[in-house]
Amino acid sequence: MDSHNHNQCITKCLQDAHHIAVQAGKKLTPQRLQVLQILLNDHRAVGAYDILAIMQRKPLEDRTKPQPPTVYRALEFLLELGLIHKVESQNSYYACTIDKPENRQHVAQAFICNLCGIVEEKAALAGAQGLYKKADGFGFKIDRVIMECRGTCAVCQTEQRQTGQRANTATGVNI
Amino acid sequence: MDSHNHNQCITKCLQDAHHIAVQAGKKLTPQRLQVLQILLNDHRAVGAYDILAIMQRKPLEDRTKPQPPTVYRALEFLLELGLIHKVESQNSYYACTIDKPENRQHVAQAFICNLCGIVEEKAALAGAQGLYKKADGFGFKIDRVIMECRGTCAVCQTEQRQTGQRANTATGVNI
DNA sequence: AACTGTTATGTTATAATATAACAGTTGGAG
DNA sequence: CTCCAACTGTTATATTATAACATAACAGTT
């Protein structure tokens, strides 16, 4: 399916996440970790209420069933640390897999498959320069850049050709 | 304030809108026109429920007070024709002011001021090529590109320096 | 004029996404 | 140990968007 070792990928991201949290003087609490793990579980973008449903099915020890604010607080925390990103055009979230040291140096470009929800994340290096330059041209000061490409991933293009069927939407991905 | 003649700008956009609708074999009905006019009224991004409130204050002749679906249907129609765009990072909408003939050739870049809500729209010419090329590199087929820059416009930067106050948020702009 | 297909609108209800507000708890720094 | 700040729990509600079905308007046909 995918060319990378996903277990390794998760392990590395979690290690990095702990590092980043410690360095920022913040705590990666069990709940925050759980949300991150859910997002790391695959490379799809997941909605907040899908995350909530998963957490409610597997509540942490000594914890009541989590409610929406719990999820949104964890998401906010992870977003601030750059550990996850939001797909603005879909109101969903995915774990950042760009190598962590450069995390805050890049503008993220997300390529989101409309069929299976998978997110391929790339760092915009030269591409973003043009935007900042253009903004300069009319005195606009950029805080944040959103770059999203909606379309069809290689796998789903193939599956469509072969079967005419839609790819996996069983896990609650919003399209 | 702004360097362009806004009346002229509105007039031109409305004329073009009629053209585009006719060419697409669609009708720019009074309600759709009203929504477009509301968005053309200034260059800010406006939320659907703000549009609804305005329409409810000034209902069209022989019409009852419009409800949410009315607004969303009009927005959908105008989006399809490329007459307006959505700011995905803010769930709001603005009228497209790019010269109409090239409308569907360009990827829109929106520079949205977090303080006053004004949207400066540019066409991404060379900039978008890189994205398509990058997508090609891993077999991703792009349907739609979202490029948004959030930040502070030239006017609001000046006002902040002079007064320390926030720019106009009185008209219901979501920040 | 009556029939029919199509597009557009009206209406009610509800889904989906997100946050406000306040109370309680906890775990270190001093 | 105590106090403070960060974290969590809980309830309610705000905000954004759509489903579902009924009705109306219009165009073309007979």
Image (cartoon, coloured by chain):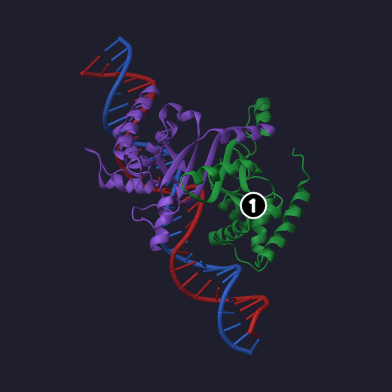
Chain colours: A green, B purple, C red, D blue
Q: In x, y percent, where is residue C19?
A: 47, 60
Residue depicted at x 55% and y 58%: A72
Measured as percent of width and height from the top left, residue A132 is found at 55, 46
- Mark 1 chain: A
Q: Quadrant of the C terminus of chain B?
A: bottom left
Residue B38 position, x and y percent, is 32, 42
Q: In this view of the protein, which residue sits in the foreground, A135 or B19?
A: A135
Residue located at (38% from left, 22% from top) = B23
Depth check: give the residue in front, D5 or A101. A101
Describe residue A26's horizontal placement relative to residue C16 as left or right.
right
The correct choice, above or below, for D21 with respect to D7 in the image is above
In this view of the protein, can residue B149 be seen by the observer? yes
Kind of residue sitting beneath label 1: Gln
Along the viewing direction, whichever of D22 and B175 lies nearer the viewer: B175
Picture layout, residue B32 above or below residue A21 = above
Kind of element beneath mark 1 = helix
Residue at image coords 74%, 52%: A10
Horizontal side of residue A162 vs B156, given as left or right: right
> Residue drawn 29% across and 38% down?
B7
Please name the residue that numbered disc 1 is placed on.
A105
Q: Could you tell me residue A67's position as x and y percent?
A: 55, 61
Q: Is residue A60 visible?
A: no
> On the image, which quarter does residue A68 sit in?
bottom right
Query: Mark 1, residues whose alpha carbon is within 10 Å: few (<14), some, or many (≥20)?
Result: few
